[in-house]
Image (cartoon, rainbow, N blue to C red):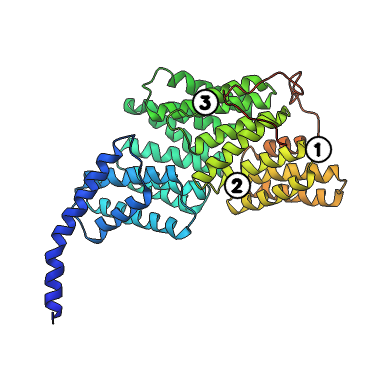
Amino acid sequence: MVGPAGISGFHQAMRKPIQRSVINAVDLQLSRMSRRDVELDADTLVGLLEKVLTWKAPLDAERLDAFVNALLELMVEEGPGTDFRQQERCIAVTDAAVNRLAELGSPTADLRLAQARYLAIFANNGTARLDAIRAALRSSQTDGERLRTLLTLAKYHIDASSYRQAQRILSRCEELARATPDLHILLPDVMTAWGMSYFYGSRRRAEPYFQEAIRLGKDMPPVSVVTNTLIAAWHYLGRVQVARGNWQAALDLYVKARPVLKDAGKGEAFFHLRLADILIELDAFVEAHYHLRKSGSLFRAVQEASTGEVQLNLALARLSIRKGDRRTAAAILKAAVADARSHNYPRGELKCEAELLKLLLLDRRLPSALSLVARMIVVLVAEERWGGIRYALTELQTAVGMPRGRSRRSPGARGSVIGCPCGADHGRPDE
């Protein structure tokens, strides 16, 4: 019979071979990660990272950092998964790895930002995402890390409709980016964020920032941070054209903004959703159905359960309204309002409630309509800290059909020959 001392000695004897095996496995996965033609699985990599930590494999900081960063990026691509325990497992193991890197004196700010991107998938405005960003800010050691973190924090506040707070942070971002030559490459991203901070209150003020982002970025190296920024700027310029009723210009800008770095993912899902929004306005139901299906399947692929799902349901409700199915539309909108509240997404809640208000007025349910308006005012006062009044009035005008300074439809919108320029075969009409 083997006593405790013998068992302990056995474990010690096995530790080094296991550690070597784990390190070899990490090296193999790092090699595979560098190849774009190899399919990777986040769950397998999470399990390997757990072994690195459990067996205290003597992996140097450079390789551990590269492995954790690649894992987090893959987790963002794959989504959080349907099992909440898996989400917690991913967060816990990457937290432990980042803490170990901090103990080794390795920079961790960018890894915390990668965690924040992962957390944003299923809680875009959640406290967990904000906590990760704040942890990144505390651990920032260079101007570059500080700027990237502040820029991410500003975008968080834009998502949460805290526009004034976002603009205060963006002032610091712009000052830092302009003062440091090595950080000029982030200026287009800063300009785009400025535009986003104004977009929901004044598209007229927002538009020049997106144009400036494109002007700055077009002559920069085509690295991902620049390319993604140009995509975002074109996308928002498309939304400006939507607000003006310039449908063809908007469609062309959306197609120009189509993400080119990855074939599928959250950005591609929003691409299809924005096209569908316009096609619904044009009563192009076949094309709209196609793009809504594509958007929904892509959101499901990354387990998007945050703002994207709310916006998708809003589009589905608008499509039902245009097709005369008000009952289905109302059910979708009520569920979307609940989702928007649970994800602290006031802009989405206001847009859904504006469409609900339209339905209530069409059905002459005035007491319910007044109650809903009161709720919208509460959301406005509580959440829309800057630009919200203008934004809410825009939504109310849309809902009740009040005249606006500029027509929402360009001449010939209904029955227009405007076509979807995406190049896809949109299929046959629903039977």
Closer to the N terminus: mark 2 or mark 1?
2
Disc 3 designates what residue? 257
Q: Nearer the viewer, residue 144 or 372?
A: 372
Q: Position of residue 104 (x, y in %)?
A: 22, 51
Q: Position of residue 371 (x, y in %)?
A: 79, 52
Q: Nearer the viewer, mark 1 or mark 3?
A: 3
327 displayed left or right of 222: right
Q: Position of residue 44 (x, y in %)?
A: 34, 52
Residue 284: give its label.
none
Q: Amino acid at mark 1?
A: Val
Q: Amino acid at mark 2?
A: Tyr
Answer above or below: position of 108 versus 170.
below
The outermost residue toward the bottom is 1
126 displayed left or right of 417: left
Q: Nearer the viewer, residue 153 or 255?
A: 255
Q: Quadrant of the C terminus?
A: top right
78 displayed left or right of 182: right
The residue that appears at 43% across and 26% down in the rendered structure is 227
Disc 2 designates what residue? 345
Q: Nearer the viewer, residue 38 or 31?
A: 38
Disc 1 designates what residue? 400
Instruction: Tell me if I can see residue 201 in this picture.
Output: no
Classify residue 66 by image quadrant: top left
Q: Amino acid at mark 3?
A: Ala
Distance, label 2 to label 1, CA atoms, is: 23 Å
Distance, label 1 to label 3, CA atoms, is: 32 Å
Q: Secondary structure at mark 3?
A: loop
Closer to the N terminus: mark 2 or mark 3?
3
Q: Quadrant of the N terminus?
A: bottom left
Instruction: Report crowding for label 2: few under 14, some 14 to 19, many 20 or more residues within 10 A (C-alpha).
Output: many
